[in-house]
Each structure stands twice: as structure tokens, then as C-alpha cells.
Amino acid sequence: MFNLFKKKSPTTAPTAAEAPARQGWLGKLRAGLRKTGSSITTVFTGTRIDDALYEQLEEALLMADAGVNATQFLLDDLKRRVKEAKVTEPAAVKALLIDALAELLAPLEKPLSIGAQQPTVIMVAGVNGAGKTTSIGKLTHHLSSEGASVLLAAADTFRAAAREQLMVWAERNTVEIVHQMGGDPASVCFDAVSAGKARGKDVVLVDTAGRLPTQLHLMEELRKIKRVVQKAEATAPHEVLLVIDGNTGQNALAQVRAFDEALGLTGLIVTKLDGTAKGGVLAAIARDKPVPVYFIGVGEQLDELETFKAREFAQALLD
């Protein structure tokens, strides 16, 4: 990868000038995860570190959608850390849990790399209601603000409103869009990738139709789109992203497994971490299906999509 952007590469850490904005966004994330975080941290308000504390913590983690495997892993790791640090106060155990969670989530922390190919073709999938098209709009804003030229492909031709919604995002971000009224989604993708190459675009973002993993004919349509994209550009798609709703708990993990089997996922965007989301599902993903989390979203505004940082997330959840 090379530094394509005029402002900064997506892999670059925030500058001092950007830090306040990042802190403001982290405040929103903490607020969104407060309900879950408080149910976990309440465990550490007692006076003793004993089996009862760990049992309460186990229940809290399971209720936070961390899943059985990740919960057991975190408990075992936490007990080891408590023993090694010779901690005697429950309040001090919370800091060790933050360390354990951050370490578990660390493999999910990976930047989205843009620039090694031109255009970089990003295919985005997700079930209806997950916030897929909105996330594409936010991702377009994120990439455009860093200097990348983006072309959108409205390949969700099954739902007219999806095409119109993406056209609105294209207008808001002042980017070009390839679309059709009805028609074959794969054909739209072929045209978009070909146009991206001809126009020298840095990124082609492909919005596919929302579907459930159990809708086998629609999942096969996704595979077809991927094959047709490869006909337009042999090395594409360079990224295959799945948008998952942070409120759906263990169902999100099932979606990751199903879409990965069908498409070979390269990254995730986790949305709606802004109120009722439990957040623990990221621990389950890290333990059971560690697909990188490129971005997390906390609201509907263009700037409410940020890169995922494992320690930031652990602190927002538990601190």
C-alpha cells in the first residue's frame, strides 16, 4: 500500500488536531454501551474476590452477548491475571478485565487498506435493516474526506428505495453513482467496476441487496455478483465487507459465519452501537470467527463511523 490520500492514509493514527473529534466520538460510544457496561462493572462493587464474583461476571458477560466460548476464555484469563497481579480488591479486577478484553479483541483491529489497486473494489453485504446502505454512505464520506475519489454501485436492484437512498448518499458526498431501474445486480456491478477503471477512481463501493443467510437463492446472487466483478477486474473484489447490527447479539455471529462461507469476508462494519446494543458480540466474534472489524458506527450522522480500536472499545464498554 502507498499513501494515496492528500490528507492522510486510512491507516494513519489521528493527529493532535483530530484527537478532540475522536474523543467526542468515544463519548458517544461510551454512552451507547453504558447499559451493558454498567451491568458488568456492577459486579466489581463488592468487597471480596470469590467464586460469587466470577459467577456474577459470567452471567453479565453472557447477558452482554459475549457467548459461551468468549465468556469462558475471558474468565480463565482474568483469573490468571488476578493471581499473577496478586490483586485483592474487586475494584482492581475491572482494570484487568479491560486488559483481557482488549487483548482478546486485538486481532480484530485492522485498518482498511486503500491504494494498492486502482480502483480498490469494495463489495458490501448485509441483511435488511442492519444499516448497510447508511454505512456505505458514511464510508464514502470517510474515504472522500481523506482524498479518495469514490464511485458507488447501486446493485440493490430488488428494492427501488435502496437505489434512491444510495443516490441521496451519493449527492450528499458529491460522488458519482452507477445505477439502473430494476435490472440485473451483477450487470450494474460490471458496469460500475468498468467505469471506475475508465474514470481513474480510487474506490468502487458496491451496495448489494440485503438478504438473510437462509435465503439461498439470494446468497447465490451474491456469489454471482462476486464472479461478475472478477470478470470486470480479475483481482477484484479487493474487500468484501459485512455490515452487522450490534443489537442482534449471537445472530450477528451466525451472519458472519454464513456470509464468510459464501463470499470470503475480509472485514466487518458494526452498526447501531448507540443505545441498546450489548457490545459483547465482538468478543464472541473475536473468539469464534475473528474477521477484522474495520469500522463501528454509533449514529446516523456522516461522521459517526470510526475505525475500530480494541483498547478504546474495551475501555468504552467497561471503564
Image: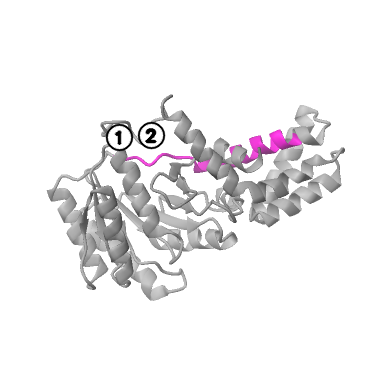
Q: How far apart are the two marked residues, 2 and 1, measured between alpha carbons? A: 10 Å
Q: In x, y percent, where is residue 48?
A: 87, 38
Q: Quick check: can you spot residue 149?
A: yes
Does residue 106 show up magenta in the picture?
yes
Secondary structure under the numbered disc 1 in the rendered image: loop
Res. 242 mark? none
Location of the C terminus by quadrant is top right
Q: Which residues are magenta?
A: 93-114
Disc nearest the viewer among 2 and 1: 2
Structural crowding at the residue carrying mark 2, measured as other residues with C-alpha within 10 Å and reported as few (<14), some (14–19) or many (≥20): some
Residue for badge 1: 1
Location of the N terminus by quadrant is top left
Structural crowding at the residue carrying mark 1, measured as other residues with C-alpha within 10 Å and reported as few (<14), some (14–19) or many (≥20): few
Res. 11 mark? 2
In the image, 75 versus 153, the foreground residue is 153
Name the residue rendered at 41%, 74% in the picture: 216
**Where is 87 relative to 123, above or below?**
above
Residue type at mark 2? Thr
Dots 2 and 1: beta carbons under 8 Å? yes
Residue type at mark 1? Met
